[in-house]
Amino acid sequence: MGASFLSATQRELASRAHAAFRVIEATGHVDDAQLARDVAALGFYPWLVPAAFGGALEKVEVLSLCVLREELAYRNAAADSLYAVQGLGSHPVLLAGTPAQQAELLPKVARGEVLFAFALTEPEAGSDVASLSTRAVRDGDHYVLDGAKRFISNAGVATHYTVFARTQDGSKGISAFVVPASTPGFRVSAKMELLGEHPIGELALTGCRVPASARLGDEGSGLKLALGTLDVFRSTVGAAAVGLARRALDEAVSYTKARRQFGAPLAELSSVQALLADCAVELEAARLLVHQAAATKDGGQARITYEAAVAKLFATEAAQRIVDRALQVHGGNGVVKGFAVERLYRDVRALRIYEGASEVQRLVIARHLLA
């Protein structure tokens, strides 16, 4: 792993994670609940919360999360998703929770005793977050939530969902709530099967009644809270892309050294060498952009919307190209189930969509340039 932005502690963390994550090497479909337990047992959830709540560091370091996600995605994309969404779903509690909410939930996040999900996307509200229609109506000292959510990672295995719902009309009328999975009126309405292994599904909230104390922050602050959370975790999506791409390149190098064609290893063909070189250059560039965005956030910059957009866009698009090239050098074996590159090809595709599609990242970057 390139280490230009990494401290000695973070390099040591990368080494530990690389060794620890070998136990969850992807081997095909697994039970999501068991995978969630396996990820918790690895002991890296404390990096998602500050030391005051049982975390590993004084404050959450985005660069350390990037290190962990790169190593985790290298081994198992589904496990990476479980881990990342634990952070994505619980981070709003850190940003806007009351002292009581934080004291109740964040230590359990660090210990892996609860598993969070981030329930923002709806059937008719994807990139256009401000158009979400799930409602939360105040009723005395409670709110009643009604609506549907779609493409919710960790659905069915999460114990708690950070749900974004409309309390008033307009873009400033969205609020956030922590909803335990056991709440009456809340259910996982469907599990979804994607190209790659990924615990994801649809939610239905029907007369779902939660106490007012379940709200995170002020009424109407939900959109700002969602965007602030994505601002932290978007660069880590790029780190996951780097992990998948790095694994693909390693697989390609090993395969071309071992595979003989025309009386010599594939690795001796100049066209194959050029392909591998292009992969290496894009991989290093992607990692540097991801680490730069994370280090900028850790350095105290309040928002890294531009930096994170650049990092996610380049890293996810580059990862798609790298995985595709790695599959190509495998020839027919590249599309055979059981070969790692076939799995990587399925796993990498979603990264160009979730937490802001590539087209949205281009808009964010352009608006920054034209402001």
Image: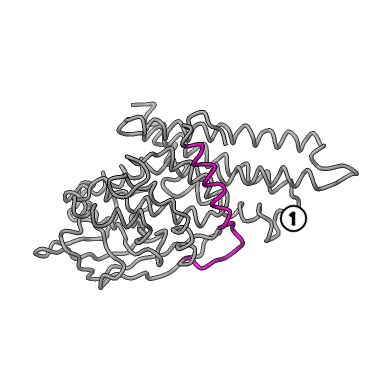
Instruction: Out of 101 and 182, give the one closest to the viewer.
Output: 101
Number of labels in the image equals 1
- Which residue has dot 1 on it? 333
Q: Residue furthest right?
A: 263
Q: Residue at x 29, y 52 (%)?
A: 131
Residue 21: where, in percent of width, then height?
54, 52
| Residue sitting farthest toward the bottom | 184
Q: Quadrant of residue 326?
A: top right
Q: By what rule are the colours in the image chosen?
A: one colour
Q: Is residue 312 within the magenta segment?
A: no
Q: Nearer the viewer, residue 251 or 371?
A: 251
Q: Tell me if 351 is positioned left or right of 102 in this view.
A: right
Question: Image quadrant for the N terminus?
Answer: top right
Q: Residue at x 34, y 53 (%)?
A: 89
Question: In percent of the image, x 71 and y 59: which residue is there?
Answer: 336
Q: Is residue 326 left or right of residue 114?
A: right
User: What residue is rendered at 34% in x and 64% in y?
Assistant: 159
Q: Residue furthest top?
A: 370
Instruction: Kindly state the secondary structure of the residue where label 1 is placed.
Output: helix
In percent of width and height, residue 77 lies at 53, 54
Crowding near pointer 1: few (<14 within 10 Å), some, many (20+)? some
User: Is 22 on the left or on the right of 53, as rendered?
Assistant: right
Location of residue 130 in the rendering, given as x and y in whole percent from the top left corner: 29, 49
The C terminus appears in which quarter of the rendering?
top left
Residues shaded magenta: 10-32
Q: Main secondary structure of the magenta part?
A: helix
Task: Report the front residue among 181 and 109.
Answer: 109
In the rendered image, the vertical position of residue 326 relative to residue 29, given as above or below:
above
Instruction: Answer with the quarter of the image where residue 150 lies.
Output: bottom left
Question: Percent x, y for residue 52?
Answer: 27, 45
What residue type is disc 1 on?
Asn
